[in-house]
Image: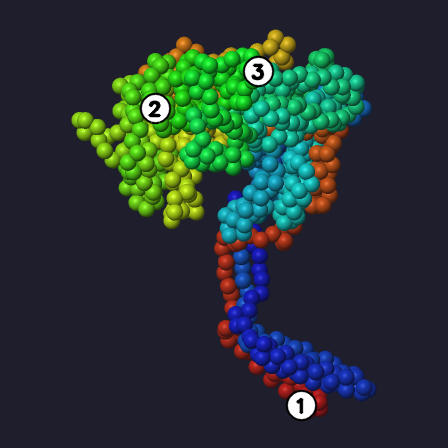
Amino acid sequence: MSMSSDWSLIIGHQLGPLGWAVLVLCVGAALSEAGLTLVRAHRGTTRTRRRSAWALLSLRLVAVAALVCVVLELGLRQQTWTGSARRVVVLLDRSASMDLADAPEGADPGSETTRRWDRLAALWSASADARASWREGERGEPGVDVEVRAFGSRTTPLTRDQADALAIEPDAAASDLTRALVELAEARQLAARGEGAPLAAVVVASDGLVVRGQAEAAHLEAVAADLDLPITTAALGAPTLRDLAISELHVGEFAFVENVTEFSAELVAHGFDGEQVIVELRRDGELVETQRAAVSGDSDRQTLRFEVAPDRTGQFVYEFRVRPAREDPPEASLANNRRAFVIKVLRDKVRVLHVAGRPDWDVRALRTLLKRDPNVELLSYYILRDWDDTLRDDGTAPMSLIAFPTEELFREQLGSFDLVIMHNFDAVSHDTYLGNVADYVEQGGSLVVIGGDMGLATGDYASAAIAKLMPVDTRELAGLQREPFAPRLAEAGVRHPITAWLGESGRADWRGLPALDSFNALPMAPHAASIGATTLLEHPSARAGGQPTPLLSVAEPGKGRVMVLATGATWRLGFAPDLPLIDGARPYDLLWLGAVRWLLRDASADRLVLEIGKREHAVGEAVDLSVRTVSASYAPEPEVEVHYEIRRLDQPDQPDQPEEASGEASGDPKADAREGALTTDALGRAATRLEGLGPGAYEAVATREGPGGEPAGAQEDDAPELGVAARRVFLIGGGGRELAEVDADPGTALLRALAEQSGGRFVDGPAGDTLPASLPMKPLDDLERPADGREDRPLWDGWLMVVIALGAFGGEWILRRRSGLL
């Protein structure tokens, strides 16, 4: 173990401004008087007097110095250090771009290439003697500690053996040199407090592809300047290679169903000369569209554009893929030939079909509300021709009323609507088409049936096809009651998104709200439990047996949703005198906007919610998956078993698709599959963490038991029921930015500038240079380092200083007497 020491003069008594002024004045006066004596002596002719004057000045200086030593309490401080006086940190770039192969300038793109990592290995081996000379020191300078760290998205310290053998692989998804230098700055602060030897120099071995854009480059330059150390850089990238890369994506986070959206990407080509490349756009692994483009020259950039009109809502993984038409010679990397992104497709406009038996205030209120929403495309019809009018039709007679387009709406275009509202509808006149409406609901559509003096009152929905979907028994003749009443909020309605506002506003007992004067009394259907039916609002009167009579009830038959409102008087919640506002909104608006949100399967109204931690994860990062379940009445539902399955979306499925690069998943569809089951806790929640998924695009599907107890998704088409199943997509890696730019020229220029600005050396790896044996370092005297030991020795506190002061002043007085200078 080496040891070094240092001596320094210290002041024990710090004077204030006045004390310093007095001290300087006194010392100046004493020295001035001695100087004047010397001047007068030199004007004389006697050599003895001149010698005496010089002796007097010397004694005066000694006396003044002794007095200053006593006044300032001067002392000597000895500091000792053990271990190395300095250290050097070597940063080795282990990012994926170091795995690329390229060739020196002027070489043909198809000629023999060298991996950048192999170039680092050669430089590292050839510089072994240089690293040894750093540790041993030269020209009388002490040796330094050499620390080696590999950097990617984070920094990893290497042992001596790992560093000598380069026992790491270039597989990091990023190369964050700025972060590595910031960590060194933080470590230097620790060294200043005594934790380790001070940092004297930094060595960076990289291809220089460590920043993207001017902002990141400026940040790196600022961090290097604050570090204030010589940074020696070794550039390992060469400028000649053959490669295609998707460098930038120009996409949003959202798109709208049936609306044309442009997805574009920047394609960068190196080493191609007028060749054709094939560009594909895929959705969830399936081909959407293919284009061809011609690329030529070095660093050829062009924009690829695809116009897409998504045909359904949900989350989807889209991916750009590019490959050359001629695959010989091979590319430097295939991992950058694809870039994936997640898009959430939303409804631009909700298509609503509203058919009413006759005009009335309730019809007008709902129609006005829907027309006021710019996101709703409303088709509204009044049925002014009843069944008798249809029977009396005379094809040759002129008609004053246009026939209702029953065939077109209920057969041809029914599937294009997101929501169908039958408002006091004379359904018996259109009984032929109720089977179509039932199919529409079972396949995922939403239906609202509103009461009045027709439809529910007259038993128009007694058809078996439609009755089995209703939460109430529509086979009975309900009739119409006109007595005013105040509805009651059912227990399930307290939490349900349609009626939760009543409980939250303190109006669960209908307090302050206008009474309703229209009611169709129907019991719950015998099959209510099998379709997840529940009552949200009840009539205050009870049926025989004490069972409440539903006013507002909902169900989830098949894949669809149904709401039955057994009154045609909710318009009074929007137009009654002295109507209270709830959070600035009319009760009518709250009721119907909540209903539409639930019917259109807003995520907040799902019975099963699946969440993934984030859309895109780094390679090797764990994926957090959580589920939340609620009952049909929207209470937290504990002890529910939720099955989840993780599947890849981007497996190679085309025979002409190029092989994936190193780090990509294999072609085995089961390689990264996961499945399992979770059981919810008392709050209806459960979570798990997925480890070890490879790079790529994935979908997560979670299912819970359906209303009848059968597993969701057990139907023949393997499509889980809506409300009891959820789907999310996510990316791992995603073809990120690490290999988006592979041209080494900008990186080499960056490393050269970094070395020049910091006072380090630049090493050209492709030219065969090695690391310098004489490494530029910060001088030892300029480094802040706390001592391991310290000893203070006072000079003023002792008899010696008194003897010196008295001897100097006494000797001066005697000499003046003898020389006649008094």
Question: Circle 3 is placed at which residue position?
Answer: 286
Q: Earlier in the sequence, mark 2 or mark 3?
A: 3
Q: Are marks 1 and 2 in contact (CB under 8 Å)?
A: no
Q: What residue type is disc 2 on?
A: Leu
Q: Is residue 510 left or right of residue 542?
A: right
Quick one: 375 or 514, which is closer to the camera?
514
Helix, strand, or loop for circle 2?
loop
**Which image quadrant is residue 519 in?**
top left
Quote the CA–CA distance across marks 1 and 2: 137 Å
Please state which of the two labelled residues, at mark 1 or mark 2, is closer to the viewer.
2
Quick one: 724 or 667, which is closer to the camera?
724
**Which image quadrant is residue 321 in?**
top right
Q: Earlier in the sequence, mark 1 or mark 2?
A: 2
Quote the CA–CA distance across marks 3 and 1: 114 Å
Q: Is residue 711 above or below residue 61?
A: above
Mark 1 packing: few (<14 Cα in 10 Å), some, or many (20+)?
few
> What number is the disc on residue 254?
none
Helix, strand, or loop for circle 1?
helix
Question: Circle 2 is placed at which residue position?
Answer: 456
Q: Is residue 683 left or right of residue 176?
A: left
Q: What residue type is disc 3 on?
A: Glu
Please state which of the two labelled residues, at mark 3 or mark 1, is closer to the viewer.
3
Q: Is residue 673 above or below residue 356?
A: above
For the point 57% across and 79% down, which residue is it?
19
**Which image quadrant is residue 65 in?**
bottom right
Mark 2 packing: few (<14 Cα in 10 Å), some, or many (20+)?
many
Residue 731 screen position, x and y as percent: 53, 26
Q: Is residue 771 visible?
A: no
Residue 396 screen position, x and y as percent: 56, 12
Q: What residue type is disc 1 on?
A: Arg
> What number is the disc on residue 817?
1
